[in-house]
Image: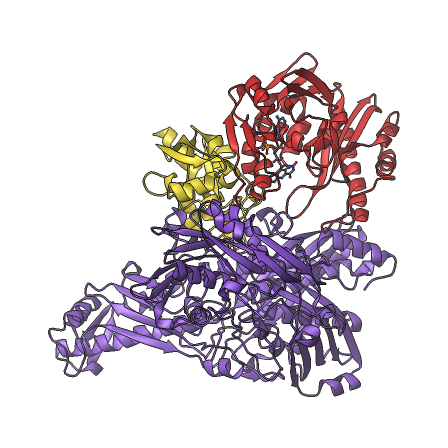
Amino acid sequence: MIPAAFEYTRARSVADALKALGARNTKVLCGGQSLIPLLRFRLAEPKRLVGIGHLSQLKGITRTKGGVRIGAATTYRELLESKVLQSDFPLIGEVTAHIGDLQVRNVGTIGGGLAHADPAADMPAVMLALDAKFQLQSAKGKRTVAAREFFRGPFSTAMKPTELLTEIQLPALPANAGTAYADFEQLASGYALVGAAAVVARSQGSVTQATLAFTGLSDTPFLAKSAGELIGTKGDAQAITRVAEGAVEGVEANDDIHASSAYRLHLAKVAARRALTEAVERAK
Amino acid sequence: MGTLFGSGIKRREDPRLITGHATYTDDVKLPGLTYAAILRSTYAHARLKKVNVARAKKAPGVVAVYTGADVKERVNPVPCAWNVPNCDLKTPPHPLLAHEKVRYAGDGIAMVVAESREEARDALDLIDVEYEPLPAVVDPEMAAQPKAPQLHAEVPSNVAFTWNVAGGDADKAFAEAAVKVDLRIVQQRLQPTAMEPRAAVASFNPGAGQLTLWVTSQNPHIHRFLCSVMLKVPEHRIRVIAPEVGGGFGSKIPAYADEALVCFAAMDLKRPVKWTEDRSENYKATIHGRDHVEYVELCGTKDGAITGLRAKVYAGLGGYASTAAPGIPTILHGLMYSGPYTIPNVKGTVYGVYTTTTPVDAYRGAGRPEATYLLERLVNLYARKIGMDPVELRRKNLIAKDKFPYTVATGITYDSGDYQAALDKALSILDYQAFRAEQAKARKQGRYLGVGVTTYCEICGLGPSQVAGAVGFGGGLYDSAIVRVYPTGVVRAYIGGKPHGQGEETTFAQIVADEFGIPIENVEIVAGDTEATPQGWGTYGSRTTAVCGSAVKIAAQRVKEKAKKLAAHLLEANEADLEWRDGKFVVRGSPDQAKSFADLALMANVAWNMPAGTEPGLEATAFFDPSNFVFPFGAHICTVEVVVETGQVKILRYIAVDDCGPQINPMIVEGQVHGGVVQGVGEALQEIAVYDEDGQLLTGTMMDYAVPKASQMPKIETAHTVTPTPVNPLGVKGIGETGTIASPPTVVNAVLDALAPLGVVHLDKPLTPARVWAAIQNGKKGGAR
Amino acid sequence: MKQSITLTVNGTDRAVNVESRALLAYVLRDQLDLTGTHVGCDTSQCGACTVLLDGHAVKSCTLLAVQVEGRAITTIEGLSADGLHPVQQAFWEKHGLQCGFCTPGMILTAVDLLSQNPDPSEAEIRHGLEGNYCRCTGYQNIVAAIGAAAAALRSGKRAGAAA
Ligand SMILES: Cc1cc2nc3c(=O)[nH]c(=O)nc-3n(C[C@H](O)[C@H](O)[C@H](O)COP(=O)(O)OP(=O)(O)OC[C@H]3O[C@@H](n4cnc5c(N)ncnc54)[C@H](O)[C@@H]3O)c2cc1C
Ligand code: FES
Ligand code: FES
């Protein structure tokens, strides 16, 4: 499998990359773990690629006033090794360990994965649950888009072709928050048949905040509205089951050779229940 | 026996493989090399209205473009080489490149040859094909219906053959039986997935008229033979080299159009040509396996004596009959219906059916996994129906060890066996009773455990050539070796087989080193080059050790006989007074009167003083043709827990007790069992080739075809019994396929055992969580089956 | 369009003239004659093409050569300058290979895995091989080999520290 020919430019800086992105039919190449397979199958045939994976401006994990900032070109391996994330956002490590394999995690980046917006990718659900903000930059300037506004459809986002995702901002979690991710993998690809990310905060035994997000279930990752119903409860099994059941009501689940929509919906409930239960447990 | 036979020494092929210094076909590089790429049909079934290659021909770097019309007069079609008799077999021509019709998505339409891989690939995009789509049919049972779309004008209802097997009177047995069970079983299509995709490099010397083909082949001599047929080039002008081969599992037995086209282009262009499959191309253009729809029945008495078996099988062949295809669901399947049991009455009908899909041929186990699976499923169903423990029922029907050689109803004769012993061993490793108790306890807690026990025997070590001829196999099934001793006492054995992972470079060296009492370092096994090796029939059907290994043994013995004659001559002693001790011929009673193997090697090769009438040199050739097949056997047990909530199956233990006779290298035997079992567990739990109704392969990449991963597979506990076969001088049976044959029913029966309380009676492989969950939902509604 | 790039391959700087679209696996195989790097799939799954990039295991079929310009690549041929690396040795001892096609990738992945986790459990080894397929061995002896290599590397380190 050989890609169609293209020109390649190695960006010297973010500004340089943004300039290059101005040209028609140009795509950025970060780790390449999603784009290169597409190129090999000639499912994408861009004229130009701009390499950004090496730009240190786009890398790194740092604490900020309001939380943590992650450079878009930070690799999964770097996420896993980050002490900051281990202490502030253990959910990131938990989900990252499920993504791809050792080799893919050595090269693939959080930003590349999010920009790619594969409906079966794991990280998007986590971004929704954590209410992450994405910084987008173009030659004209910067803007911030909430993860919850970012994913528009399969492989489609709020980004313009001339924009670069530069950083992911994670707002700090309440001190008494617990998080968890539960998923079921497609046997061949390892992508999520269904994944559920949960964030729960408790105060004196009662749930004060609850978010639940799904991936793999339908065209885009989404937040479950029913999660709010957990607030005020003790986060007991019954309440969780109610939320999990409600979460998928009316959802049109994907149906393919790997799982029927009925099975996906069922798994979504199980994943939601497991993630919420775990998150409640951890919210102490 | 010598000192190396039976020892698990490290493999001699490994140093090159672990350092990256092995040469696989795609590693071969020649001066002036060009690269080929093949345009494949995107439709499953269509008339070709136009194939316009004008733009591609003008593309940068393109050397040539060939279409079906260009080559059809100059080459012969791909032959089918197993013409099973008495079944009205129809094998319509399979052109190297389609010219009128395409019959599966992946059928070759044109080949581009260019200066680089990239340019060849780019030019494919410039070929315009106009198709007139025709309806597809992918299911073999549906394809055999009168109104189904027809692939070949000369094959009504797509039925390529109707093969019958019968022994005893099955209809009568069923009419009289107290108990009957039946199942409709789908044995899903599988994608073999040798990790190395197929490749071919051809080079032609126009001065000498000599063609050399490097090819991913399990059987270079068969490739030479069939390429000669396709290319109309005499066999002695073709040298086939199968260099390192990265797995085959049957998929590198057949002759394919692709390698013939590469040869054709090399001859036409007088430049070397290389072609290498991509994985997604491999999934479309390399053979698939299994693909049966079966209606099967078993009958017996109320107390568990099996009296009859009937089967009606629709076996998918794909778009054309591949090299060995007709023999797989017939000779290697139907003849094995009674497995390890005494079943007096057997009757089977197998329809070989063309469908608009990738051709189906031998895939690890080839016919025997399907036979074992349907039988073991029926046996369990029968046990369930009469309320007998399935192990008890098996015991009752196993052929007793004092009955061998034993002729089964289908007419074949099993060589040797002690089936009960293998079963006992497996049961004791598990502690069957303890597991049953644990299972009962778990059920009370709402946990679903299950156990599957399989007793099996299989047919391999193919096989007597006379039988090959009688069943229409287009070749012999003997094998061969030349054992050649060099002047310095080192030895090479040139073999007809072509190991590609099975380790015969080690095990055969063990045989030779033992025979001559020399260090194994002084022995080398040479395989895979038709120019160096004697006529052989390849590595498949778990035949290489049993058949080719025996040839090695016999050739080595012949060498030793000659060496002995020379020793007697040089020592001026009687041959009868010589004994072989510590690698020397010693005159009995005079230990200093001796000739070592090295002395004799030198003396024979310089020939200064040979006995009268004895030729110089020290080498021998042997062709070994066994008197029968061999029938390895064993018992496999699997225990599982099914997570009812999600349908996930967790294998708790997998126990494999196999009997392949004496083991030359137990480490290698164990490795074969591990690999075989995992391939079968993959079949049981996750592998399936899926086509949509238009004939598009939906599992066309590794993203969708679930090749087993390390984290998905169990640890396997192995053990053995040892029952030698009388049919070869080593006493050995095959072990390459037993794991794949025994494991699918073992796992499936374990899962069905676990789900029995939920009303689930039947499930088709693979038992993906999605399927298991759906069956449980169905069972809850009382709608099982 | 071709461009000239430099890669450090097995410790030696190599200048190669490559097309932008050239995948690292093919540059290694076709241009640098390092055919121990294999290609077993086209969807970045099988891991036969695994090499070390600055010491980390990566799939060379899923990297453009131009993307890794200036970086250090270790292929199976360069894993051990003299003798066998402990991981190679363990694959040999434990019969961790049959046809050998997956083996270079397995070994290089194992090297990275053990550098991250010097004492992995069986489950961790199996999880670490998620991106490496083997159709021959059933993985059991590969897992055993990596376990044995881990032990050898640990005792080697201890011996080294003691010396
Ligand atoms: C074998 C395999 C298994 C995988 N399994 C999983 C899995 O289980 N779960 C999962 O979630 N994912 C999985 N992935 C996908 C993986 O997460 C992504 O491939 C990877 O994270 C993408 O990052 P990248 O840097 O390699 O992106 P690239 O491939 O470089 O880019 C991907 C896309 O995003 C664009 N892009 C990249 N960076 C930016 C940016 N900063 N701004 C704007 N656009 C950008 C590119 O133009 C391209 O369209 C798997 C991938 C492979 C190869
Ligand atoms: S060839 Fe690179 S992952 Fe398969
Ligand atoms: S040894 Fe053959 S694929 Fe692993």
Which corner quadrant holds the C terminus of chain B?
bottom right
Which tint was used for chain A? red
Which corner quadrant holds the N terminus of chain B?
bottom left
Q: Position of residue B622 (x, y in %)?
A: 34, 76
What residue sits 61% from the left and 31% below the top?
A25
Q: Which residue is more in the foreground, B510 or B429?
A: B510
Residue farthest top in this picture: A65
Which image quarter: residue B7? bottom left
Q: Which residue is more in the foreground, B150 or C125?
A: B150
**With respect to residue B467, does B452 lie above or below?**
above
**With respect to residue B36, does B315 lie above or below?**
below
What residue sits 48% from the left and 43% below the top?
C49
Q: Which residue is more in the foreground, A84 or B116?
A: B116
- Please say which color scheme the image uses: by chain
Which chain is tinted yellow?
Answer: C
Which chain is tinted purple?
Answer: B
Can residue B281 be seen in the rendering of this structure?
yes
Drawn side of residue A198 relative to residue A99, left or right: right
Drawn side of residue A237 relative to residue B691, left or right: right
